[in-house]
Amino acid sequence: MPPQDPATGEPIVPMRLQRFLARAGVASRRGSEDLMTAGRVRVNGAVVTELGSKVDPASDIVEVDGRRVELGTKAVHIMLNKPAGYLTTMKDPKGRRCVAELVPCDRYPGLFPVGRLDMDTTGLLLFTTDGDLGQRLLHPSMHVDKRYVALVDGRVRDHELEPLRRGIELDDGPCQPARCRILSVREAREVAPHGIGDFETAVEVIIREGRKNQVKRMLSRIHHPVLALHRSDFGPLALTGVKRGHWRLLTEEETAALERASAERAGAPKPSRTPRRNRS
């Protein structure tokens, strides 16, 4: 009987190298191709850059940046508290600062951001080496809730948020209904650490879509331009235990919650086991 993939139980057969890397949790399929063309992948000691190359996972030795990769290798998930002034990209041809500078890419080859935050937006940015998970979380039919805290210009009355709750129309089409409310000074510390001005308002906006500048455009549409924007939650993840500009690995419980959320969006069976909460 041929050897089996420990993750799926399926027989292991020769496959394209980029597919092997993606299934091993190194990066997305596209990210794996980038690793190959950059000369960072070796098979049996030889650099392989040709995208059509195949490997036999049962006998070939695959390495990325000198680290051996095998099917069943545990994927890595990282939470970054993104500061302002960084592009959500792993490389910028213009030499601008990128979020890749803030996460341990050398330690975990193939890390990529799930979605993006604008350059001046702060807060929770998820990174993973699991291409399948990243695709599930970003697919239009499976988008998870994202909570933003916005400091906007002008005094906002609750009734002004009704168009956002109904689903406001933007230049690129109508938005799905958002959950919105006006926040207190204490709840708005991430965007207003020195308090809220007399002609400013802090607003919570929870959306499931991920269009470019969406929250900013939604609030501008009701005539309250955004002065500062922060993302505090992404699906079941809350930004805790990490300072601005720093990162941490997700806990087993957070990883399980993220996988459940993506499975529920996809209509797939939920994972059968949830790690116990560490009560120490």
Image: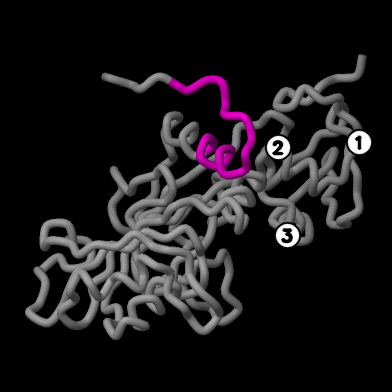
Disc 3 marks a residue whose amino acid type is Asp
Q: Which mark is residue 24?
A: 2
Q: Amino acid at mark 1?
A: Pro
Secondary structure under badge 3? Answer: helix
Q: Which mark is residue 3?
A: none
Residue 71 appears at what percent x and percent y?
73, 31
- Between 85 and 215, which is closer to the camera in this rendering? 215
- Give yes or no for residue 237 being in the magenta stretch: no
Place of residue 181 in the rendered image (x, y in percent of width and height, measured from the top left)? 24, 62
Name the element at disc 2.
loop
Residue shown at 81% from the left, 21% from the top: 4
Residue 243 is situated, as x and y percent measured from the top left of the image, at 28, 52
Identify the residue shown where x is 65% and y is 31%: 73
In the picture, the quarter occupied by the N terminus is top right
Cα distance in 3D space between marks 2 and 1: 14 Å
Which residues lie in the magenta part? 259-275
Query: If you read the primary sequence from the N terminus, does the residue marked by circle 2 or circle 1 appear first?
Result: 1
User: Label 1 crowding class (10 Å Cα cut-off): few <14, some 14-19, many 20+?
Assistant: few
Location of the C terminus by quadrant is top left
Identify the residue at horizontal 54%, vertical 45% (top origin).
Answer: 107
Q: Residue furthest left?
A: 198
Determine which residue is flagged by label 3: 34
Q: Which mark is residue 14?
A: 1
Q: Are marks 2 and 3 in contact (CB under 8 Å)?
A: no
Q: Is residue 46 left or right of residue 262?
A: right
* Position above or below: 269 against 128: above
Left/right placement of residue 62 relative to residue 107 reads right
Is residue 158 positioned above or below 131 on the image? below
Front-lying residue, 68 or 167: 167
- Residue 140 falls in image quadrant: bottom right
Type of amino acid under label 2? Ala
